[in-house]
Every structure is written in structure tokens, then in C-alpha cells.
């Protein structure tokens, strides 16, 4: 654990060193130095609307994930239980997953209000991941355990609690990691194009328009930090569970 942490520190230091020397070969518009990005980051924190912008983006990401799970979980379970249901839904799920996210953003710009677009794009981006993982978890249930449950006439509640949930749990956790790893990238991209008025993507869009590269990178790193924090909390939760 300690060695892994030291390696990460060394890798970060080397990255910053390469970045620092590379920035000397270009103007700050093309590649600002790490110091310039840090200054922009501090200026952003001092902005009275800083946490509001972050809150808006996190709020949209949160509701996108919640709605996705509410829709995907029952579909995934049914797909795992019934082959007919799997065969019916699978082409639609693959179609949604195969379409470029940017295409969904552009369509959403036509269909929806600007504030809902990031939520919609999150749903579209993560729902196939959840459905397929849940379906796979259900399909992997040990059928011998189900047969024994039937012999001993266990209630449906006990079958779900003691057989299905443990089987699904690993796949559910796997989908969570993928979902949280992708959600903020997707929601920010949608905000950049939708211009909802508030949010990290809105600030990044204005930084691009004003050619403020340091500010653009500062907000980009903010997205990385938020993702790292959430993934870290998820890891702690898994350790506590184990």
C-alpha cells in the first residue's frame, strides 16, 4: 500500500516535470505551465459561484445515475431470468451502447431543455452498462442452489436475498465502477455543448471561447478530482463491506 502510494507520487512528479519543461516550448495559449493552471484553479475556488457550478454538475450526474439504475435494474433482472426477454432487449441495448455519445448529445439539443440534456446523456451512456452487468449476474446464479431452494420450499424473498443478490452483487459493483468512471466525463461534455448556464461544462465552454487554456485545464482537473474522490469513497465502502 505504502509502496503503491510512493509510486503514484513519483509518477505524478515526473508528469509535472515533463509538463513544466514542455510548456517552455509553447505559448501559454497552447500549453500553460502547471503553475499557471494552479493559479487559475485558486482563482476559480475564490469565485463565489465555484461550488455552485460543481454542485449543479454533481446534481445532474447524480440524478442521471439514479434514473439509470431505476430503469436498468428491472430490465437487467428480467433479461437474466428469461431468454426471450434477453433476445428482445439485447439489440436495443447494443444499439444505444454503439451510438456515439456525441450523437446523443446533438439529438438531445433538438429534443430537450438545455438543463435536462446532461441528465439524459448520462442515462443513455450508462444504462446499457448497468443492464448488461445485472443480466449477466442473474444468468450466473447457481441453478443447483435454485433447485435446492425449490426442494426446501424457500420463500421468494429468501431466494432473492440469499441466492440472487449475492450473485448479482459482484456485477453490480463492477457496473458502479464503470458508471462513476464515465459519468462526469459524459455530463461535462453535454454541458459544454448545451450551455445550461451553470456547471463545470459551462465554465469549460467559456474558457475555450475566451481562449483561457489554463482555466480550461483547471476545470478539467476539477472533474478528475471529483471522479477520484467518488471512486475513493466507493473503494472504502467495498473494504468496509468485505
Image (tube, rainbow, N blue to C red):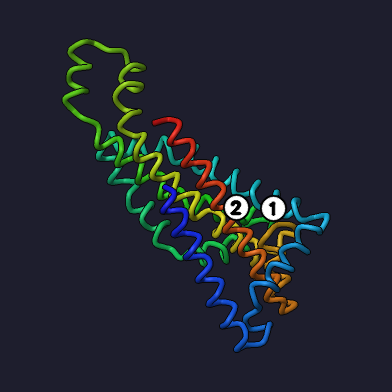
Q: Quadrant of residue 162?
A: top left
Kindly check if marks 2 and 1 are in contact, taking CB atoms under 8 A apart as contact.
Answer: yes
Q: Give residue 184's position: percent from left, percent from top.
A: 56, 55
Mark 1 sits on what residue?
A: 54
Q: Nearer the viewer, residue 230 or 73?
A: 230
Q: Residue at x 25, y 32 (%)?
A: 141
- How many discs mark residues in the rendered view? 2
In-front residue for pair 42/111 = 42
- Tag 2 residue: 226
Residue 100, compared with residue 213, is above or below; it is above
> How far apart, in angstroms, are the residues tagged by discs 2 and 1?
9 Å
Name the residue located 66 percent from the left edge and 64 percent from the top edge: 219
Q: Secondary structure at mark 1?
A: helix
Please state which of residues 19 and 44 is positioned toward the viewer in this rendering. 19
Q: Does label 2 or label 1 sit earlier along the sequence?
A: 1
- Mark 2 vs mark 1: give the one in front: 2
Position of the C terminus, as image quadrant, is top left
- The correct choice, above or below, for 148 with respect to 28 in the image is above
- Disc 2 residue crowd, few under 14, some 14–19, many 20+, Cα 10 Å: some
Q: Position of residue 224 (x, y in %)?
A: 57, 58
User: Is 113 left, or right, of 119 in this rendering?
Assistant: right
Q: Nearer the viewer, residue 196 or 211?
A: 211
Amino acid at each position: 500500500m505504502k509502496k503503491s502510494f510512493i509510486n503514484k507520487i513519483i509518477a505524478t512528479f515526473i508528469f509535472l516535470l515533463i509538463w513544466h519543461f514542455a510548456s517552455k516550448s509553447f505559448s501559454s495559449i497552447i500549453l500553460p505551465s502547471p503553475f499557471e493552471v494552479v493559479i487559475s484553479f485558486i482563482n476559480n475556488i475564490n469565485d463565489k459561484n465555484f461550488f455552485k457550478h460543481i454542485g449543479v454538475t454533481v446534481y445532474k450526474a447524480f440524478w442521471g445515475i439514479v434514473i439509470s439504475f431505476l430503469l436498468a435494474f428491472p430490465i437487467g433482472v428480467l433479461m437474466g431470468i428469461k431468454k426471450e426477454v434477453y433476445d428482445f432487449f439485447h439489440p436495443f441495448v447494443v444499439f444505444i451502447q454503439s451510438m456515439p455519445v456525441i450523437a446523443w448529445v446533438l439529438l438531445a439539443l433538438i429534443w430537450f431543455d438545455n438543463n435536462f440534456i446532461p441528465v439524459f446523456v448520462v442515462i443513455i451512456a450508462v444504462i446499457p452498462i448497468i443492464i448488461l452487468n445485472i443480466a449477466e449476474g442473474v444468468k450466473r446464479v447457481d441453478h443447483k442452489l435454485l433447485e435446492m431452494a425449490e426442494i426446501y420450499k424457500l420463500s421468494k424473498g429468501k431466494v432473492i436475498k440469499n441466492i440472487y443478490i449475492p450473485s448479482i452483487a459482484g456485477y453490480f459493483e463492477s457496473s458502479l465502477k464503470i458508471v462513476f468512471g464515465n459519468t462526469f466525463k459524459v455530463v461535462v461534455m453535454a454541458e459544454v455543448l448545451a450551455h445550461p448556464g451553470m456547471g463545470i461544462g459551462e465554465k469549460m465552454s467559456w474558457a475555450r471561447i475566451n481562449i483561457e487554456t489554463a482555466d480550461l485545464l483547471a476545470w478539467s482537473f476539477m472533474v478528475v478530482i471529483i471522479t477520484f474522490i467518488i471512486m475513493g469513497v466507493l473503494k472504502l465502502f467495498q473494504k468496509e463491506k468485505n
